[in-house]
Amino acid sequence: MDQFQVIDHCLMVKLPQEIDHYQAGYLSQEADSFLLRPDVCHVVFDFEDTEFMDSSGIGIIMGRYKKVAPLGGKVYAINVGKQVGRILELSGMSKLVEVL
Amino acid sequence: MKEMKNDMELTFDAISSNEGLARVAVAAFVSRLNPTIEELADIKTAVSEAVTNAIIHGYGNIQGYCKHGEALETIDKESPGKVRMKCQLEHGVLKVMVEDQGRGIENVEKAMEPLFTTRPDLERSGMGFAFMEAFMDDLQVESAPGVGTIVRMQKKMTSGPWIPSEE
Ligand SMILES: Nc1ncnc2c1ncn2[C@@H]1O[C@H](COP(=O)(O)OP(=O)(O)OP(=O)(O)O)[C@@H](O)[C@H]1O
Ligand SMILES: [Mg+2]
């Protein structure tokens, strides 16, 4: 499966095993290039493969949230594991993002 | 019988790809205490935050992974700094020190407030110190502008059994 895919107005982002600053710039830039497309309204971050995320991940999610939310778009986090879940919880992200 | 004591010191280039190295090193260092998955995650997260701060704030080396796996950080490295990580295990307590000789922090108290960041342009969220505080038992930050920053963290390992070395 492609790391970035558009399905039904949603940009699906398959996140890597580890999300840190090293990975963040690339993921954000690439996601943003898809968000320019008029048919993309929502973002779904898929954490299925992700075992580790630090505050860099908050930046990725928050940054995309700020882009889609003013246009009525939503951000989802799916397949969230324990470590990522705690980061989302502690940072307050779980209030902005629908964690499924 | 003597209690187990162990020390480790690692010095590496202040480039973003070494964040993963620091996490793996500290995880391996505590592994003989049989830490729980959660303890291990806590320690790795706290270390990742401290090391990332040293690299991107201390030295301003912000370059990360680029398209198609090309890592440009060695080319775009702005400052040739080093990050020093010291780990110590004694009496079932892990102590980690992360040190840089970068630009330092003017107001440590302010910097440690949740959501405070000087780099919103890099999409930093200002949660690094808050995570270190949440995931470790103790956090001390010492810094001087133009000199550098030392972050000291401690965590009591509840998991076990940690094995005393025989003597
Ligand atoms: N080693 C360091 N050298 C210089 N400045 C630092 C260092 N560590 C932290 N700082 C300063 O403290 C601020 C807060 O750090 P903190 O880790 O809490 O947030 P952040 O790095 O900005 O964002 P996040 O960690 O959530 O991505 C930083 O924005 C930076 O100005
Ligand atoms: Mg930080």
Image (cartoon, coloured by chain):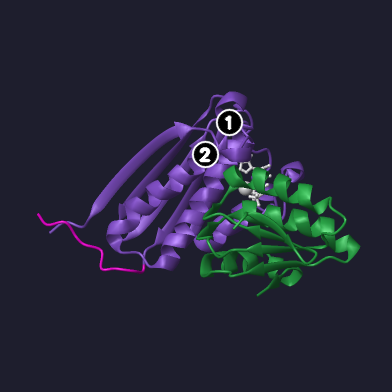
Chain colours: A green, B purple
Numbered badge on residue A80: none
Element under disc 1: helix
- In the visual, does A83 lie left or right of A10? left
Magenta stretch: residue B161 in it?
yes
Q: Of B82 and A22, which appears nearest the observer?
A: A22
Measure the C-alpha gap from mark 1 to mark 2.
Answer: 8 Å
N-term-proximal mark, 1 vs 2 = 2
Q: Position of residue B160 (x, y in %)?
A: 29, 68
Disc 2: host chain:
B
For label 1, being within 8 Å of ligand 1 is answered: no
Q: In the image, what residue occupies the spot 27% across and 58% down?
A: B32
Mark 1 touches mark 2? (CB < 8 Å): yes
Q: Position of residue B1 (x, y in %)?
A: 12, 59
Q: Of B150 and B37, which appears nearest the observer?
A: B37
Instruction: Please determine whether, in this image, residue A59 is positioned above or below residue B71.
Output: below
- In the visual, does B34 lie left or right of A8? left
Name the residue type under label 2: Ser
Please name the residue that numbered disc 2 is placed on: B17
Neighbourhood count class around disc 2 (C-alpha, 10 Å): few under 14, some 14–19, many 20 upward: many
Neighbourhood count class around disc 1 (C-alpha, 10 Å): few under 14, some 14–19, many 20 upward: some
Name the residue type under label 1: Glu
- In the visual, does B101 lie left or right of B109? left
Instruction: Please determine whether, in this image, residue B92 is positioned above or below residue A78.
Output: above
Q: Is residue B78 visible?
A: no
Q: Which residues are magenta?
A: B158-167
Q: Of B74 and A37, which appears nearest the observer?
A: A37
Query: In the image, ligand 1 is in what quadrant?
Result: top right
Magenta stretch, main secondary structure, is loop
Element under disc 2: loop
Number of numbered labels in the structure image: 2
Please name the residue that numbered disc 1 is placed on: B73
Disc 1: host chain:
B
